[in-house]
Amino acid sequence: MPKLTLDRILQSQGFGSRKYCRELIEDGEVVINGAAVTDYKSTPDTDGLVFTLFEEEWTYREHVYIVLNKPADIECSRKPSHHPGVLSILPEQFSWRDVQPVGRLDHDTTGLLLMSDDGSFIHAQSSPKRHVPKLYVATTHDPVTEELVQSLLAGVKLHDEPQTLAAVSCRVLGTHEIEIVLEQGKYHQVKRMLVAAGNHCTALRRTAIGGLTLEALELEIGEWCYLEPEHLALLVPA
């Protein structure tokens, strides 16, 4: 595979058009190994490449995989309609790289959201055939009862769904708080299941996908981080 020229490298990392990236390089804004590189036709090895731009250090990544602790009132859409889009709270480079959410969380749902510019990864993670458990914590309008838990575990019938849907596991966390683990990922599934079981949701957050948890990542609301290989391995079905 032919090596990328430096202007193409910057463009691939989301720093703007190829023309703009050339201008950055020719103006001496790109530093590699402590020295400014002004030849945009240079072809540095991208394996482990670290460069400085805008006085910040960057590592070349062929694809980006990130996890965000999504705030409320943010839409998981590149073309939001009623609330700010999720890309508005992330570095501008991600928009240039066409980073997209993996699946969606409702605008009022918070918690763990995967994002990437790798189409194969997005497709694989979104596939219902993967059976990757997703853990949600729901705050309910009415008190949580044992009958509610048993109903969710046994399965409830949702409108437009041919079969009943059941939680993989379900446990009470408080008088109005319940933890639910699902594998299907249907539209508004947690909220609809709670309504079908005789209660309804007043707040919802996703706290884990597979073995990847917000607690281990220690991300505050609105914070994000890159997913490294050890994190990606946690997303593989057991």
Image (cartoon, rainbow, N blue to C red):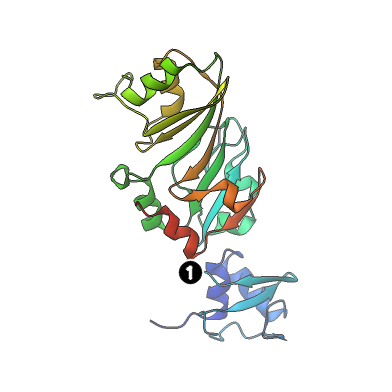
Q: In the figure, 161 relative to 109: above or below?
A: above
In percent of the image, x 59 and y 53: which residue is there?
217
Left/right placement of residue 222 relative to residue 126 reads right
- Give the quarter of the figure containing the N terminus: bottom left
Q: Nearer the viewer, residue 63 or 185?
A: 185
The residue located at (28%, 23%) in the rendering is 164
Q: Position of residue 212 (x, y in %)?
A: 49, 51
| Res 231 visible | yes
Taking the spot 61% from the left edge, 33% from the top edge, the residue there is 83
Q: Amino acid type of disc 1?
A: Glu
Q: Is residue 28 left or right of residue 131?
A: right
87 relative to 25, above or below: above
* For residue 91, above or below residue 54: above
Instruction: Name the element at disc 1.
Output: loop
Query: Residue placed farthest to the front in the image?
Result: 146
Residue at which label 1 appears = 62
Residue 229 on image: x %, y %: 47, 65
Q: Is residue 186 left or right of residue 81?
A: left
Tell me: residue 153, above or below residue 34: above
Image spot of residue 175 (x, y percent): 58, 19
Q: Looking at this view, is 141 or 32 the one in front?
A: 141
